[in-house]
Amino acid sequence: MTNASHRASQAQLWALWQAVAKTLLDQLNTAQPGEVKASLINVARAFLADNGIVVGGAHDPRQTRDGLSQLLDNVPDFDEGWSVLNQH
């Protein structure tokens, strides 16, 4: 990969992450405290589905939801991370 194509790939990846972050922030800004985790799961599921990525079983929506739940359960302290994000 040339330097120019590497930079282009990095720019595309950065744009993709910006879109994900904006979607998450839009969802979280309208969520009540108890809905934050559900909102994250829904956004993640929609984003992954839009990009042809299936988490968990392809034919069992419960597995997809549960797989994302488990991923989010492994986040050490969402509230602390959220407050750090809001400072920037």
Image (tube, rainbow, N blue to C red):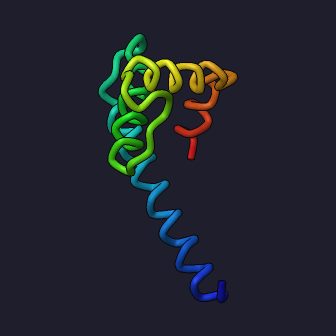
Q: Residue furthest right?
A: 76
Position above or below: 59 against 20:
above
Q: Which residue corresponds to the image point at 55% horizontal and 73% vertical from the top-left?
A: 9
Q: Quadrant of residue 28?
A: top left
Q: Nearer the viewer, residue 75 or 25?
A: 75
Residue 61 in the image, given as x and y percentages of width and height: 37, 22
- The answer to whether 54 appears left or right of 82 in the picture is left
Q: Nearer the viewer, residue 56 or 82?
A: 56
Using the rendered image of the protein, determine whether residue 40 is visible from the camera's viewpoint. yes
Residue 55 in the image, given as x and y percentages of width and height: 49, 34
Q: Which residue corresponds to the image point at 57% horizontal and 71% vertical from the top-left?
A: 10
Position above or below: 14 against 3:
above
Q: Quadrant of residue 72?
A: top right
Q: Residue furthest top?
A: 34
Q: Residue furthest left?
A: 30
| Total numbered badges shown on the rendered structure | 0
Q: Quadrant of residue 73?
A: top right
Q: Which residue corresponds to the image point at 57% horizontal and 30% vertical from the top-left?
A: 83
Q: Which residue corresponds to the image point at 49% horizontal and 18% vertical from the top-left?
A: 66
Residue 75 in the image, given as x and y percentages of width and height: 65, 25
- The answer to whether 26 appears left or right of 1 in the picture is left
Using the rendered image of the protein, determine whether residue 37 is visible from the camera's viewpoint. no
Q: Nearer the viewer, residue 65 or 4?
A: 65
- The answer to whether 70 appears left or right of 33 in the picture is right
Quadrant of image for the N terminus: bottom right
Q: Nearer the viewer, residue 11 or 22?
A: 11
Residue 68 in the image, given as x and y percentages of width and height: 51, 26
- The answer to whether 32 appears left or right of 6 in the picture is left
